[in-house]
Image (spheres, coloured by chain):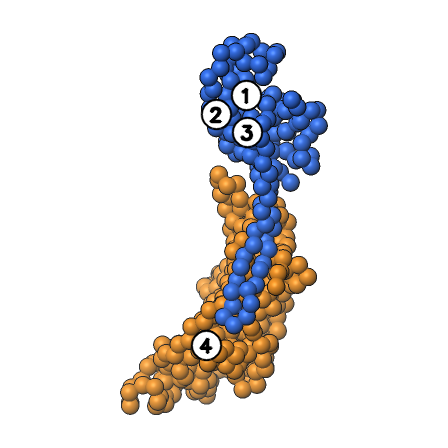
Chain colours: A blue, B orange
Amino acid sequence: MTAWYLGGVRITVVDLKEAREIIVAKLQPLSEGTYYQTFGNIRPVFTITAYVVGTADKASLEDMAEISANEPYTLVASGTEYSYSADFYVEKIDFQWLTSYAQSFRPDKPRTDFVYKAAITLDAIV
Amino acid sequence: MVDILDCSVTSTSHVTSITISEAHNQPSTSAVVNAVDTALDMGDAITIDCGYVGNKPQIFEGWVKNIEKKVPDDTFVITCNDELVKAQDFFIASTTPDTQYTARNISAEDLVQALLNMAQITDYTHDTTYFTFGITRDVEVNLISSYDMCKTIADILAYSIWADSTGTVHFQDRRPYVMDDDTSFKTVSGILNITHRVSVRDLRNRVVVYGAEGISASAEVESPYLPAGFRKSVVVASPWIDSQSMAQAACDYNLDKLNRLTEEISFEVIGDPDLHARQVITISESYTGVSGNWYIFTCEHRWGQGGYTTGMELRK
C-alpha cells in the first residue's frame, strides 16, 4: 500500500475525495434573463479517510488542527507531494478508535499499538 | 450572461467585498473595503477600480480614514472618504483673533476656492455664480470647518459641492432633481427591484433669510400639495449675507429649489460601475410604469460574494 505522510506523520489512506467550487451569484432582473456573476474559486477541499497507528501519531495530527499552529502541511504520497504542489490547512480531524488485537498497518511499530480510523478535512492553499 | 467580478484596490490584495456610498446630500463619498491583506495605513491615498473583467473603471479616489483588523478571520476592514473629507477635517482657527481670514468683494466661487485651498484641495471646478460676498463689510472666516463654510455658501445660492470619483471638487448649480438642461447619461436596464413613492417630505413653500444686522428677506408661494394658506418654512441664516438684494436672491433661489413634490424611486440594478450620484439616467420599466429621466440622489455600489449590484434613489 502507498505510503502517505501528512506533515511528516505516516497515515494509511483508504479514501480521498476532492471538492472544488466556484462562487456564483445569480441575479434575476424583473424583465430579463438571469445574470450570473462569478466571484472566484473556493480553494479545493480534500476529505481523507485514513488509518493512524499509535497515540503519538494521533497526538501529532491533533496538534495540526490546533488554531495556534495556523500553518500549512504537506501531503506526500510515495515520496511525491500530492496534488499540484499545494500545502494544506488541517481544518478538522475526527478519530474513531478501532478494536484490534494486533495491528499490521505499521510493521515498524509494536503490534499492540492502538489503531484509529481518522476522517481528515484539508483546505488546499492555491 | 456570465460576468467575472474584478477589482483592484491600492496596496490591498484578496478583496472580499467593497461598498461605496455616495449621495447628493452627503458631505463626502465613503468606501468600505474588506480584504485579507493590505499595506495601507492611516492617511494613505487610495483608489478603487471595481466592476468586471474587461470593465473595471476607477470608481473611487480618496483617503484612508480607518483600518480595523478582525480576528479570528484575520481580515481587514478599510474605511475611506473622498477628497472632500479634507475640507471636513480642516477646522479654520486663526493663530490670534485678530489674524483671521478676511475677504472683500469676492465671488462665491473664489471664496469657496480659497476655503478649499486652506484644506489642501486644489483640483476644483465651478460654475460662475454672479454672487459677490463682502460688498459692504469684510467676510470674516474663523472657528468653522472648511466644508461647513463652503456648504453654507452653497446653501445660500442653492448650489451643491461634491467630489467626483477622480477627486475633482465641484461647486455647481446642481439641484437634487432633473433640471431643464440635463441630458441623460445612459438608459439603465437590469432592474432587480423597484419602489416608487411621492411625498411632500422635503417640500418648502416659504423661505426666510436672516443676514447681517438689519438684513432679512422672505419669499413664499401657495403649494397645490398643501392645504390652502399652509406654509412649510425653512430658514437660511448667515452673517455673510450683507445686502438686501443678496438676501432676496437667496430666498428666491431656495424657494425655486425646495417648492416641489418629491417623487422618488428606490431601485437596484445589476452592478454598473459607471453610475454615480448626481447623474441623470433614463429608465423605462413596465411593472410600475416608471419612465423618463431621473436624477441619481443616492448611489451605492455593493460588490462581493453575493454579486455586484448598484442600489439607487432617484428623484424626478
Q: Amino acid at mark 3?
A: Thr
State the residue in front, A20 or B42.
Answer: A20
Q: CA distance from mark 1 to mark 2?
A: 9 Å
Q: Disc 4: which chain?
A: B
Image location (x, y in percent) of residue A75: 63, 29
**Horizontal relation, residue B25 to residue A10: left or right:** left
Image location (x, y in percent) of residue B224: 35, 89
**Tag 3 secondary structure:** strand
Mark sitting earlier along the chain (1/2):
1
Label 4 sits on residue? B287
Bin the neighbour count of mark 4 within 10 Å (Cα to Cα): few under 14, some 14-19, many 20 and up: few
Q: Which dot marks residue A49?
A: 3
Image location (x, y in percent) of residue B96: 49, 61
Q: CA distance from mark 4 to mark 2?
A: 58 Å
Q: Disc 1: which chain?
A: A
The verdict on a common chain for dots 1 and 2 is yes
- Which of discs 4 and 3 lies nearer the camera? The answer is 3
**Tag 4 secondary structure:** loop
**Tag 2 secondary structure:** strand
The verdict on a common chain for dots 4 and 3 is no
Label 2 sits on residue? A95
